[in-house]
Image: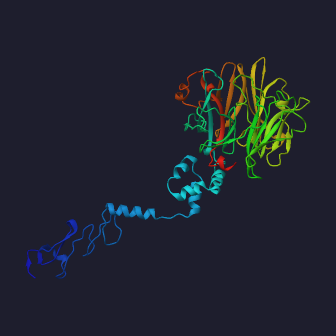
């Protein structure tokens, strides 16, 4: 070695730290770094020793290979994802929790999904999830379009929307329930995912979620105003049943009762209540026809309605859907003590039986609502609220929202509307109302029916 000034010159191979490129050249290295003639590697951020250094990145797959993004890699990842397999039981559980609208689209995804969604087992599993989920609750809205020769009935258009205290959520126009156009059917009741409609000539069992329907035979009895209907599912016989009770008008104290079981496909007359009764629910206005009378309340496997016996005593009558045995339970004391009741009825709010009445005095109209918190226990009747308004003729409860608000149908002296305690409740956008050719009442008076139903995949055609 040869000393020059204070540095020692040695021939070394140097790895240039820039860009990690290895090259060979002469360098002046301080003497304290020289021990012997060998390869010296000047440290850099990415160099530890003499070898190929892999710079960490998001695209590194293996320790010593750098993979740059490319379309072929992305395609390989996509193909690998497509090969991921879920057990059928997981797929069934996921799909059974989806809305009906999504499932109808997914039928086009594959033959397997189409077959699965059409299976009776899957429809039952989906229904068991839906009936306990508030997100599957929907409004079924019947909007009348009066004609020049019949301003009270006319033709109908149907809409659905989410049951929510927030107005106009997910409003959709539904197709005509049958091939008859314009539609002449009216809603009489809803139950267990299905709706019962009636025209002057026949009945129609309709699933508004799938738009499937089947025509039912007419009962062999004259049509009367004020008939009451109920639709429910009999778990014992695995069958749907429809109960029809005629108005007392024209039948004295014992109007006929008929029941229709879908599996039998025919109406049959059943015995009347043993104490004898009459239903006092005849219409108060021309447009309060048989199509808008309150439907029978179906809860705890039985139909319910308010009747009056031969001694003019009011009570709740019930008919068990399975054994068709009659029962009865007392009304709240508050209703029994009201002498001049104008209107009264029962309904179902959040799965509980409710009773309500309307009456008038010198101060105007009054509406009272009770709920039976423990089914069948008289002492569990609890008054929810009272409404007093000068121009109020009657009010009818429709449903109770998750925030506790109750939607009511108000019948004022000059018009009708839907309201909560916060004010008027709008069911349809302005465009739907403005499309009507003839306005005979203001606001929501165009809406002839409003029912709550639960989305389902149940096919009416497979029930008959």
Q: Is residue 109 above or below residue 334?
A: below
As rendered, which of 122 and 198 lies closer to the eye? 198
Q: Is residue 405 visible?
A: no
Residue lying at 75% horizontally and 51% vertically, measured from the top left? 235
Q: Position of residue 391 (x, y in %)?
A: 70, 19
Q: How many marks?
A: 0
Q: Position of residue 254 (x, y in %)?
A: 87, 33
Q: Can residue 341 be seen in this view?
A: yes
Q: Where is residue 433 in the image (x, y as percent from the top left)?
A: 56, 27
Q: In the rendered image, which quarter contains the N terminus? A: bottom left
- Which residue reaches farthest right? 311
Q: Quadrant of residue 24 in the image? A: bottom left
Q: Is residue 206 above or below residue 117?
A: above
Colour option used: rainbow
Q: Is residue 274 above or below residue 286?
A: below
Please state if 278 lies on the left or on the right of 53 as rendered: right
Q: Where is residue 393 in the image (x, y as percent from the top left)?
A: 73, 22
Q: Quadrant of residue 402 in the image? A: top right
Q: Quadrant of residue 275 in the image? A: top right
Residue lying at 34% horizontally and 66% vertically, measured from the top left? 60
As rendered, which of 185 and 444 lies closer to the eye? 185
Please state if 52 lies on the left or on the right of 181 as rendered: left
As rendered, which of 367 and 75 lies closer to the eye? 75
Please state if 458 lies on the left or on the right of 235 as rendered: left
């Amino acid at each position: 070695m040869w000393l020059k000034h204070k540095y020692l010159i040695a021939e070394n191979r140097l790895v240039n730290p820039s860009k990690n490129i290895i090259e060979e050249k002469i360098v002046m290295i301080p003497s304290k770094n020289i021990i012997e003639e060998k390869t010296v590697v000047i440290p850099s951020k990415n160099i530890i020793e003499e070898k190929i250094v892999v710079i960490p990145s998001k695209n590194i797959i293996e320790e010593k290979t750098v993979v740059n993004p490319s379309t072929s890699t992305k395609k390989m990842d996509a193909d690998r994802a497509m090969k991921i397999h879920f057990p059928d039981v997981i797929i069934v559980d996921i799909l059974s929790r989806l809305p009906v609208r999504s499932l109808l689209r997914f039928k086009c995804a594959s033959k397997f999904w189409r077959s699965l969604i059409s299976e009776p087992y899957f429809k039952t599993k989906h229904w068991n999830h839906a009936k306990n989920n508030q997100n599957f609750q929907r409004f079924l809205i019947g909007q009348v379009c009066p004609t020049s020769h019949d301003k009270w009935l006319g033709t109908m258009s149907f809409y659905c929307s989410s049951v929510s205290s927030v107005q106009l959520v997910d409003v959709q126009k539904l197709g005509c329930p049958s091939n008859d156009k314009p539609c002449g059917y009216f809603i009489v009741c809803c139950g267990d995912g299905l709706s019962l409609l009636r025209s002057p000539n026949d009945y129609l069992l309709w699933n508004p979620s799938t738009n499937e329907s089947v025509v039912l035979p007419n009962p062999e009895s004259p049509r009367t105003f004020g008939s009451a209907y109920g639709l429910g599912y009999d778990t014992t016989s695995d069958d749907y049943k429809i109960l029809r009770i005629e108005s007392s008008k024209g039948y004295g104290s014992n109007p006929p009762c008929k029941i229709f079981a879908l599996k039998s496909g025919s109406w049959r007359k059943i015995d009347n209540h043993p104490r004898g009764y009459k239903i006092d629910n005849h219409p108060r206005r021309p447009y309060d026809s048989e199509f808008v009378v309150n439907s029978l309340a179906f809860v705890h496997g039985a139909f319910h309605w308010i009747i009056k016996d031969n001694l003019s005593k009011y009570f709740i009558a019930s008919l068990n859907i399975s054994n068709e045995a009659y029962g009865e339970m007392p009304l709240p004391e508050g209703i029994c003590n009201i002498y001049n009741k104008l209107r009264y009825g029962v309904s179902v709010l959040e799965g509980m039986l409710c009773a309500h009445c309307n009456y008038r005095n010198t101060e105007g109209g009054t509406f009272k609502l009770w709920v039976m918190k423990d089914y069948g226990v008289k002492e569990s009747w609890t008054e929810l609220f009272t409404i007093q308004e000068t121009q109020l003729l009657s009010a009818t409860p429709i449903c109770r929202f998750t925030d506790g608000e109750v939607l009511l149908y108000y019948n004022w002296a000059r018009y009708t509307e839907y309201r909560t305690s916060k004010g008027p409740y709008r069911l349809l956008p302005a465009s739907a109302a403005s499309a009507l050719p003839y306005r005979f009442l203001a606001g929501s008076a165009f809406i002839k029916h409003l029912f709550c139903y639960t989305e389902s995949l149940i096919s009416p055609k497979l029930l008959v």
